[in-house]
């Protein structure tokens, strides 16, 4: 990826998704507490936010490469 912002967002998205997956693995073996559920909600919100930022940056990158009419 040529755009460093896009690369950073991709890396951050991968990181937060791995973090979220690890949290889910931990929860699979025990009944989660209210605090754990709240943490999971924050984690999912972060995944959604970073995903939206990544997709928006990717769209800008694609549109910048299109020939101008």
Image (tube, rainbow, N blue to C red):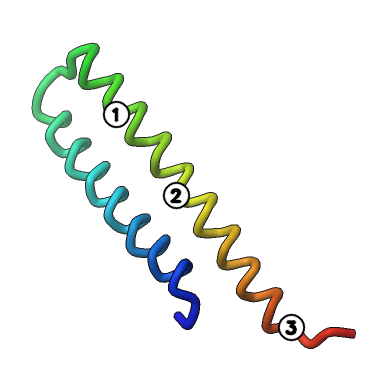
Answer with left or right where residue 49 lies relative to residue 65. left
Residue 66 is marked as: 3
Residue 20 is marked as: none
Percent position (x, y) of residue 53?
52, 53
Q: Is residue 37 above or below residue 52?
A: above
Percent position (x, y) of residue 30?
10, 23
The answer to whether the residue labelled 2 contacts the one labelled 3, judged by CB atoms less than 8 Å apart, is: no
Dot 2 alpha-carbon crowd within 10 angstroms: few under 14, some 14 to 19, many 20 or more: many
Percent position (x, y) of residue 38?
30, 20
Answer with left or right where residue 12 lies relative to residue 5. left
Residue under the point 18% across and 19% down: 32
Residue under the point 69% across and 78% down: 64
Residue 40 is marked as: 1
Q: Earlier in the sequence, mark 2 or mark 3?
A: 2
Distance from disc 2 to disc 3, alpha carbons, whole Å, reads 25 Å
Dot 3 alpha-carbon crowd within 10 angstroms: few under 14, some 14 to 19, many 20 or more: few
Distance from disc 1 to disc 2, alpha carbons, whole Å, reads 15 Å
Q: Is residue 29 above or below residue 20?
A: above
Secondary element under disc 1, as helix, strand or loop, is helix
- Which residue in the rendered view is the most extreme toward the front? 4
Answer with left or right where residue 67 lies relative to residue 10. right
Residue toward you, 49 or 40: 49
Residue 50 is marked as: 2
Q: Is residue 68 above or below residue 25?
A: below
- Which residue in the rendered view is the most extreme toward the right? 69
Residue under the point 42% across and 34% down: 45
Quadrant that contains the C terminus: bottom right
Secondary element under disc 2, as helix, strand or loop, is helix
Residue mark closest to the camera, 1 vs 2: 2
Q: Quadrant of residue 23?
A: top left
């Amino acid at each position: 990826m040529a755009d460093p912002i896009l690369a950073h967002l991709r890396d951050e998205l991968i990181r937060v998704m791995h973090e979220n997956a690890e949290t889910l693995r931990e929860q699979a073996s025990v009944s989660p507490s209210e605090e754990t559920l709240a943490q999971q909600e924050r984690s999912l919100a972060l995944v959604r936010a970073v995903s939206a930022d990544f997709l928006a940056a990717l769209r800008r990158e694609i549109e910048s490469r299109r020939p101008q009419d």
